[in-house]
Image (cartoon, helix red, strand yellow):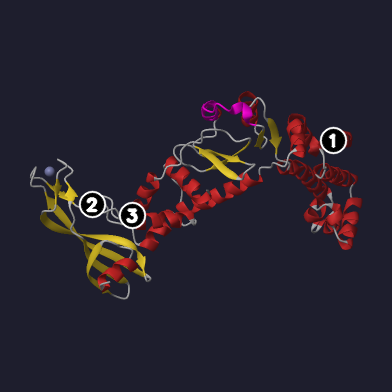
Amino acid sequence: MPISDFTAKLLELEDVIIKDISSSDTEIHVFFSLKRRPHTCPHCSSVTEQIHDYRTSIIKDIPFMGKKSFLHYSKRRYHCSCCGKHFYESFPLLPKHCRITTRLAFYSIHLLKNRYSVHSAASLLGISDSSVFRRLKDICYPKPSSLPKVLSIDEFKGNAGSQKFQAILTDTEHHRLFDILPSRSQTSLMRYFQQFPNRKKVAYFVMDMNQVYRDLALEYFPNAKLVIDKFHVVRYVTWALENVRKRIQKQMHPSKRRYFKRSRRLLLTHRKKLNEEGVLALEVMLQQSPDLATAYHLKELFYEFMESESREEAVHRLKFFRIAAQASELEEFDPCLTMLANWAKYILNAFECPYTNGYTEGTNNAIKVIKRNAFGYRNFSNFRNRIFLALT
Ligand SMILES: [Zn+2]
């Protein structure tokens, strides 16, 4: 095999004739042309091998041996003796009017998949941001055709397109991103869900405590069980306990406040997870105020409810908590009781299925990273593509 063929093989530029290679510390320049072969005229379909002239284009390729690489392609124009017109030879590595090779474009997409931002991928490869964006536009993730059995919804502030908030849907059972929607508004969600003929097959709809999502699910997924992620619920109780503590602390004589050092952590940790020293400090603190002791007791009751292992157990423990909270007459627990009055039914559903919003929220965090790296996306479909590329 001639050396030029070996070089072509190494550069994965097969069927080319390499004429020269020059290199510096940072760049490699490869000069080549294609082998002459019969071409079909795109105007009249007759076959010709007659050369009209050559034009050289300089094309950027993927980095080679750690250096920027440039292809100097001596592009042949054929002459058709039948219709008299001229045309360029075809070269699959290079789409028409492109200054970068197809493989370089694909490589930039590969970098995006590995969580590079558009800008950092472009500067690493020495190409413009817009070449990467152009390639991103070519990729298309079509709208899914049927809804999954377990659908989960969340929202994030993407500021993409003209909308502040975007909605994210996941297939929670299979831990897959399902879709990203340009808006979380009721009308746009309705319009979106209407398009799916298998809406009745959605068995679980996992969401946070949002009335819009609830109304929508009740209307569009008549056979679905609505599930509120348990972990969104706990904070109502921790808020209540914290507010009681703050009230007590304010009324307290400064000399006694020292008992409340580290109090937040001591109060919020599950009692069974405290060490001996912690338990003692906690006891001293609770002795300072009957209200605080009651609030603490309620929190522990709620943690026990959260640990229920079956729906029946959860129903029982929740009922117990609600009676105790009402009897306590601590107004700090009112928001928690109101929340339970509205959502208990769906919170309890969480105890009979393994589905939580955890995957969706994890996805949401990954999206935040993409957004931060990109300094925002004005175009929603680019943003959606970008997310699918990184997460699927
Ligand atoms: Zn022709």
Taking the image as shown, residue 124 lies to the left or right of residue 267, namely left
- Gap between marks 1 and 3 measured at Cα: 60 Å
* Residue 71 image-quadrant placement: bottom left
Badge 3 crowding class, 10 Å Cα cut-off, few under 14, some 14 to 19, many 20 or more, is some
Q: Position of residue 333 (x, y in %)?
A: 80, 38
Q: Secondary structure at mark 2?
A: loop
Q: Secondary structure at mark 3?
A: helix
Q: Position of residue 345 (x, y in %)?
A: 76, 31
Q: Amino acid at mark 1?
A: Glu
The range drawn in magenta is 187-202
| Label 2 sits on residue | 90
Taking the image as shown, residue 240 lies to the left or right of residue 276, namely left
* Magenta span main SS: helix
| Label 1 sits on residue | 312
Residue 381 magenta-highlighted: no
Residues at discs 2 and 1 in contact (Cβ within 8 Å): no
Q: Amino acid at mark 2?
A: Ser
Residue 298, disc = none
- The answer to whether residue 315 of the structure is visible from this angle is yes
Badge 1 crowding class, 10 Å Cα cut-off, few under 14, some 14 to 19, many 20 or more, is few
| Label 3 sits on residue | 102
Q: Secondary structure at mark 1?
A: helix
Q: Of marks 2 and 1, which one's residue comes earlier in the chain?
A: 2
Q: Of marks 1 and 3, which one's residue comes earlier in the chain?
A: 3
Taking the image as shown, residue 131 lies to the left or right of residue 280, namely left
* Residue 17 image-quadrant placement: bottom left
Quadrant of ligand 1 in image: top left
Q: Amino acid at mark 3?
A: Thr
- Gap between marks 2 and 3 measured at Cα: 14 Å
